[in-house]
Image (cartoon, rainbow, N blue to C red):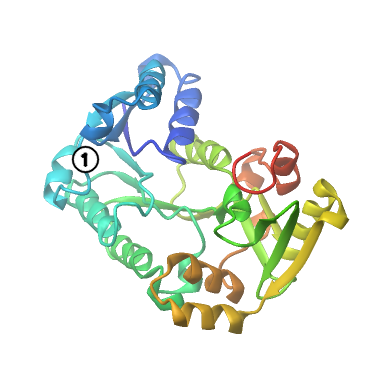
C-alpha cells in the first residue's frame, strides 16, 4: 500500500487533498493509498474555529495529520519524517522564505523518497531562467538542477501558469477597481498571453498524475491561455464596455518601477509577465487536454463571480 504526504493545506494544498481523497475512493481498499498532510503544530493547536473546522474536514476525508514545522526544521529532521512516505507533494508556496524549497528538495533526496512533486506550480522556470527580474525564480531553477542531477528519486513538475484568481487581484494590477468602473491593464502589450489555472483544476490534474498517470518530468496544465486583450473583452462583457477603462503598462515602465523598488516581489512578477517568455502555452500540450480533464476557463471563472476584482 503506497503512502502519500502532502506538505501544507492552503490555497492549493486543500484542493489537492480533496481530489486525491476523491480519486482514491475509486481504488479497491487493498490498493488504496494512505494520505497524510503535514501541518505546523501551531496550526493544529490553533484556537481559531475556522482552522479547527478545516482540520476536521481533512480528517473526515480519512486523511492523517503529521505535525512538523518546515521553517524551523533542518533538512535532516525533515528527512526523518519524509522517509516513511513513497510520494511527497509540496504545497507550501513561497511563504517559508528563501531557501525553503531547496531544503525540502534536499530532505526528499536524503530520505530516498520514490516520487517528488515540488512546489513548481507556476510558470516555466526553464524558459524564464534564474536571472529574470532580479533573480525572482533563482531558487526554483536551483531545485530543478538538483533534481535533474540525480536518478534515485523520480520527480514531476506541474507548470500551471498563475492561479486564475491572481489575474483579478487588485495588488497585481491587471484588473483593478477604479471607483464604480474597472481598469484592465496589459502587461507589456495587449497581444501578450498568459496561462491561468484554478487551484481546483490543479488538484484534479495532480490527483490524476499521482494515482493514475505517473509520468515524470515537466508537465503542463492550463485552465485558459489568453491575451490581455481577450481578458479586457471578457471583463467588458461582464461589466459593460462603458464601465471598463484600458491601459498598457509598457515593459520599460515596469522595469523602471522595479528599478525604484528592486525588492518588491509583485513588481518583479509584473516584469516577468510583461516580458512574455515562459508564462503561456497552448492547451494541446497540457495534461488536462491529453487526459480529457475538464478545466475552468476565464469566461466561466468570471461567470461564477459576483465581483470581478478581489474576493468573489
Residue located at (28% from left, 64% from top) = 146
Residue 6 percent location from the top left of the image:
34, 37
Query: Residue farthest to the front?
Result: 179
Residue 37 percent location from the top left of the image:
32, 32
Q: Is residue 226 left or right of residue 73?
A: right
Q: Quadrant of residue 43?
A: top left
- The residue nearer to you, when weighing 125 against 287, is 125
SS state under label 1: helix
Q: Can you say whether 293 is above or below 116 in the image? A: above
Q: Is residue 213 left or right of residue 286?
A: left
Evaluate whether residue 276 shows in this view: no
Evaluate whether residue 53 shows in this view: yes
Number of numbered labels in the structure image = 1
Residue 242 percent location from the top left of the image:
87, 57
- The residue nearer to you, when weighing 188 against 171, is 171
Quadrant where the N terminus sits is top left
Residue located at (47% from left, 19% from top) = 25
Quadrant where the C terminus sits is top right
Residue 210 percent location from the top left of the image:
44, 38
- 10 Å neighbourhood of mark 1: few (<14), some, or many (≥20)? many
Q: Quadrant of residue 67?
A: top left
- The residue nearer to you, when weighing 203 against 301, is 301
Q: Can you say whether 249 is above or below 67 in the image? A: below
Residue located at (34% from left, 22% from top) = 52
Q: Can you say whether 120 is above or below 16 in the image? A: below
Q: What residue did someone put label 1 on?
A: 82
Residue located at (16% from left, 45% from top) = 79
Amino acid at each position: 500500500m503506497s503512502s502519500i504526504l502532502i506538505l501544507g493545506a492552503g490555497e492549493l494544498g486543500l484542493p489537492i487533498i480533496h481530489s486525491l481523497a476523491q480519486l482514491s475512493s475509486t481504488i479497491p481498499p487493498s490498493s488504496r493509498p494512505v494520505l497524510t498532510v503535514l501541518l505546523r503544530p501551531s496550526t493544529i493547536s490553533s484556537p481559531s474555529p475556522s482552522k479547527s473546522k478545516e482540520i476536521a474536514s481533512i480528517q473526515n476525508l480519512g486523511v492523517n495529520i503529521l505535525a512538523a514545522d518546515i521553517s524551523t526544521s533542518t533538512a535532516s529532521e525533515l528527512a526523518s519524517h519524509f522517509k516513511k512516505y513513497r510520494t511527497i507533494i509540496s504545497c507550501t508556496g513561497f511563504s517559508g522564505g528563501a531557501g525553503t524549497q531547496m531544503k525540502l528538495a534536499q530532505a526528499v533526496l536524503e530520505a530516498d523518497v520514490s516520487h517528488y512533486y515540488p512546489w513548481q506550480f507556476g510558470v516555466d522556470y526553464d524558459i524564464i531562467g534564474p536571472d529574470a527580474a532580479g533573480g525572482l525564480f533563482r531558487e526554483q531553477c536551483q531545485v530543478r538542477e538538483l533534481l535533474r542531477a540525480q536518478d534515485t528519486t523520480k520527480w514531476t513538475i506541474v507548470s500551471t501558469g498563475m492561479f486564475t484568481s491572481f489575474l483579478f487581484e487588485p495588488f497585481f494590477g491587471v484588473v483593478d477597481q477604479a471607483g464604480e468602473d474597472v481598469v484592465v491593464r496589459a502587461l507589456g502589450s495587449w497581444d501578450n498571453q498568459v496561462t491561468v489555472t484554478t487551484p481546483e483544476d490543479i488538484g484534479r490534474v495532480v490527483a490524476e498524475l499521482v494515482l493514475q498517470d505517473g509520468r515524470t518530468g515537466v508537465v503542463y496544465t492550463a485552465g485558459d491561455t489568453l491575451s490581455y486583450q481577450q481578458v479586457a473583452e471578457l471583463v467588458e462583457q461582464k461589466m459593460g464596455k462603458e464601465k471598463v477603462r484600458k491601459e498598457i503598462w509598457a515593459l520599460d515602465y515596469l522595469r523602471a518601477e522595479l528599478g525604484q523598488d528592486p525588492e518588491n516581489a509583485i513588481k518583479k512578477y509584473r516584469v516577468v509577465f510583461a516580458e512574455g517568455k515562459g508564462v503561456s502555452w497552448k492547451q494541446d500540450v497540457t495534461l488536462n487536454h491529453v487526459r480529457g480533464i475538464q478545466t475552468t476557463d476565464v469566461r466561466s471563472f468570471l461567470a461564477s463571480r459576483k465581483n470581478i476584482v478581489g474576493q468573489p
